[in-house]
Image (tube, rainbow, N blue to C red):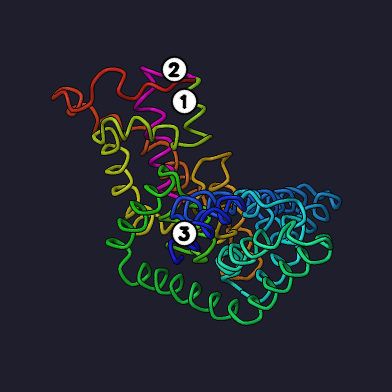
Amino acid sequence: MENTNKKGFKAFLAKKDIVFSAKRYGIDALGAMAQGLFASLLIGTILKTLGQQAGIDVLVEIGTFAQGATGPAMAVAIGYALKCPPLVLFSLVAVGSAANSLGGAGGPLSVLVITIFAAEFGKLVSKETKVDIIVTPSVTICIGVLLSMWWAPSIGAAASAVGNAIKWATELQPFFMGIAVSVIVGMALTLPISSAAICAALGLTGLAGGAAVAGCCAQMVGFAVMSFKENKWGGLLAQGIGTSMLQVPNIVKNPWVWVPPTLASAITGPIATCVFRMQMNGDAVASGMGTCGFVGQIGVYTGWLNDMVAGTKAGITSMDWMGMLLICFVLPAVLTPIIAYPMRKKGLIKENDLKLDL
């Protein structure tokens, strides 16, 4: 009888497409959340900054509206990744708004955790009653908003505490933390998880944000230049301003190909934190974007403007520009092929090991 009940419950979950797995929640949902962040907060910040610099008020207004939709955009993106039916998906707008607002600085992490619970509960009751149009949104919204009131402040505080600890440690030990943050966030960018979402969830800005940008750029530019022989200009652009995640299948086949850009990030990270003191004080999500659409660089530039408005920075200097250019583009493009050269000579990296199917 017990086995029958278990089989029946498993069949019910399968029918509802509820899958309890690290991939579904830690990769699919997290990656989708980053896209929601990009399509609201990040693009809104870019448009708003362009409008402020060019004196175009309508762009400032558009950007402000986009930024205001951050919570709902993340929640809907997560719901889409979880394959929610329409009524559940649309109801997540209210859930995302509540979780992001009540989560404070740790809003993105609050949205991720709470939206997953609300979405799965919504899927459980979806189309199970004759008044589905009332029951499904009510359950989804009530579960989500109640959990937001209960959990979001604590989740937000915990995420902020971790982020602040990383930022404090980076200020205290810029060399070692520069290496650690650069390497870890850079590797997260290349892996099929979201470095942008991680940085946003932890509120990773300041000197630690600068190290994160350095690590992401080392992976993207490093892979793009290192594989130029195999992938030519298409691969250079696809990886350099797209994503180094394209190399994951090649990394699985031969993990040695990951060593040069990762070592490059271990070099550029402390240079960013110790030599140029490069900080990323724009939106935290930009810390995990690297050269993808030049979002990391726009974030650094936006941070400079924010610091000038706050009175903590007198102006943008030539040293600032030189640091960004070297850390984000020149050093990764030079260091990665140099590190890869002896590895190619020894046969650790063979011809076409970095070939992409573009």
Instruction: Determine contact: label 1, label 2, CB under 8 Å.
Output: yes
Instruction: Please name whichever residue, 286 or 324, is drawn nearer the observer in this view of the structure.
Output: 286
Residue 179 picture location, percent across and down: 30, 56
In the rendered view, would you say 32 is above or below 335? below
What separation in Å lies between label 1 and label 2 (alpha carbons)?
6 Å
Does residue 59 appear in the picture of this structure?
yes
Residue 20 picture location, percent across and down: 48, 57
Q: Is residue 334 located in the magenta-colored stretch of the structure? A: no
Residue 236 - label: 1
In the rendered view, would you say 261 is above or below 89? above
Instruction: Please name whichever residue, 33 or 224, is drawn nearer the observer in this view of the structure.
Output: 33
Please give the residue where the numbered disc 3 appears in the rendered image: 209
Residue plotted at (29% across, 48% down)? 267
Q: Is residue 77 left or right of residue 261?
A: right
What separation in Å lies between label 1 and label 3 (alpha carbons)?
25 Å
Label 3 residue SS: helix
Q: Quadrant of residue 164?
A: bottom left
Q: Is residue 232 located in the magenta-colored stretch of the structure? A: yes
Residue 232 - label: 2
Residue 340 - label: none
Q: Quadrant of residue 110?
A: bottom right
Label 2 residue SS: helix
Judged from this view, the residue extending furthest toward the right is 58
> Which comes sooner in the sequence, label 1 or label 3?
3
Task: Determine crowd level at label 2: few under 14, some 14-19, many 20+ residues with C-alpha closer than 10 A.
Answer: few
